[in-house]
Amino acid sequence: MKTSDQIPSAPLAEIRGISKRFGGVVALDQVNLTIRPGEVIGLVGDNGAGKSTLIKILSGAYLPDQGEILFEGQSVQIRNPRSSKDLGIETVYQDLALVDTLDVPGNIFLGREIVKFGFGPLRVLDKSQMAREAENILQRLGISLESLQAEVGLLSGGQRQSVAISRAILTEPKLIILDEPTAALAVMEVGHVLELVHNLREHNIGLVFISHVLQEVFEVADRIVVLRKGRKVADLVKEEASIDLVVNYMVGKIEEKKTHA
Amino acid sequence: MPNHWRTWALDYGLYVVFALLLLILSQMSPYFFTVSNLLNIGSQVAMIAVVAIGMTMVILMGEIDLSVGSVAALAGAITAGLIHALPSEWPMGLWLAFSITTGMLIGIVAGLVNGLFVVWGGIPSFIVTLGALSIGRGLVLLYTGGRPIFGFGDAFGKISWGHLGPVPLPIVIMLSLYLLAWLFLCKTQLGRYIYAIGANKEAVELAGVNYRRIKIGIFALAGAFSGLAGIMLTARLDSAQPTAAVGWELDVIAAVVLGGASLYGGRGTVAKTLVGAFILQLISNGLNLLEVQAYWQQIAKGSIILAALLVERILRGRR
């Protein structure tokens, strides 16, 4: 994994000239973005800068008006959440999209349950197999939970976030989008989630990390992409960026400069 | 109160209340703990309990079905009408089977219509099934002309008066359906989705599951249970009354809610619903043994349900 820092690998996803309008409002304007495997991109910007619109295009919730998306070198159309998942893109939503009354394996496997056998639409769940595999995934990510049988509604914010991330990596995706993964967490738990993001990078997965907290972004990201009013105004390697610089881009004190796309 | 006590009370409190009721009733009357009285209670509760299976599933999805009584009456009346219309060239047994199947199908169609209005029409199930309650009852009155249809012979009556060994058939029907429903909800993927839909349907949708189809299917299944219970009632009374099953929705919802299912969806079990249904029946039975006037019985029943829910609310805290 260390080598990926020196030798740029082939891009995992390339977003080229994506635009999106809602009525008269331009949400995204000719945005370019390249994501490489094993790379964490910190996506930042003020409210309404276009962050959510951009990730919703990648996760299949919105269709772009203009532009092209290349995934592993192929031009692709992401029409709905299903086709995004089929490409190998998983999104961990801000509200986590967990079912509070189900246990941990139940949530990790929601929609892709392992079944023993079935009669037509009646498929019998293989609960012990799901519990074992859930345990494996959690272990791989270095997550420890007291009990897998607990309803996830009873877990802490950080534990819930861990479950949501475990759920996302179940299908071994190539790209994971984390939408404000630390927004609802206690300070104590933020560290755990950031560590988790580090672990994910080791698996050679491309990551898009969205956060309002620039300290966190600097802690986990390799590159920092700043959106402002729907335009990409900066695309910085972390080493050449500072919090002040990024803030200046975010609030428009420094105008857009051409950087490597 | 320590937390684990609360959890224990929430998980097992219902069974304690059930056991206490049995104890109290057996002290009150020497006839209570006789086999014939217990089997009689089981037969009485069977119809409400069967409807309560479908209602539990509907409530688990965070919906409600107020039309169960009307749908039961409609299925019962149409089955009754068909039995009377026996064509001379059909053998009796086959025609009975056809009549009963048609009655059940009426229930399924009614449930399907409810489900379609809720899911595709986007109308709250409370309103949809309130409408269906009224329409269904109107159809029953139209079909029967406001007069009971009665007298079907012994073969049909067996549904409610027959026995399997020593056990009355309604009890056999009820217990086997509960067993199947329990397996369905606890062991299958669809069963799990029913819980998940009630708890967070957006999450289910994002997981790529078509929850709309499941919802419609469960409304249809609930209709089938209502239809079956309506046919059982017609067989039990040997008559389809135009006012049959009026108010069933209240008894059924009371049983489900007493069983601890959350009206917000996602929480509840059929086993506890069955206990809830029995508790309600035992209270009636006990008040009868005490010769309490019927008007007071209604007041007592309602108060007990409210008290039970209040206790649960307190035990759950603010969640």
Image: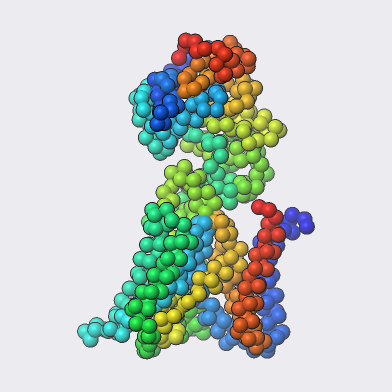
> Which residue occupies the foreground of this view, A16 or B140?
B140
Q: Is residue B192 visible?
A: no
Nearest the viewer among B267 and A26 is A26
For the question of whether residue B280 can be seen, the reply is: yes
Camera-nearest residue between B213 and A170? B213
From the viewer's perspective, tell me whether residue A180 is left or right of residue A113.
right
Q: Residue at x 59, y 33 (%)?
A: A181
Q: Residue furthest left?
A: B89
Identify the image quadrant of the N terminus of chain B: bottom right
Name the image quarter holding residue A140.
top right
Left or right, B257 with respect to B205, comes to right
- Give above or below for B239 relative to A57: below
Please state the horizontal and vertical placement of residue A250, each as a whole percent of the image. 56, 19
Residue occupying image coordinates x 36% and y 28%: A65
Which residue does the image show at 47% across and 64% down from the upper left? Answer: B65
Between A231 and A83, which is closer to the camera in this rendering?
Answer: A231
- Residue B15 % position (x, y): 66, 69
Which residue is drawn at the image coordinates 62% and 73% (left, top)? B302
Q: In the visual, does B188 lie left or right of A68?
A: right
Residue found at the far right of this picture:
B1
Q: How many marks?
A: 0
| B221 shown above or below B300 | above
Q: Position of residue A28 (x, y in %)?
A: 44, 24
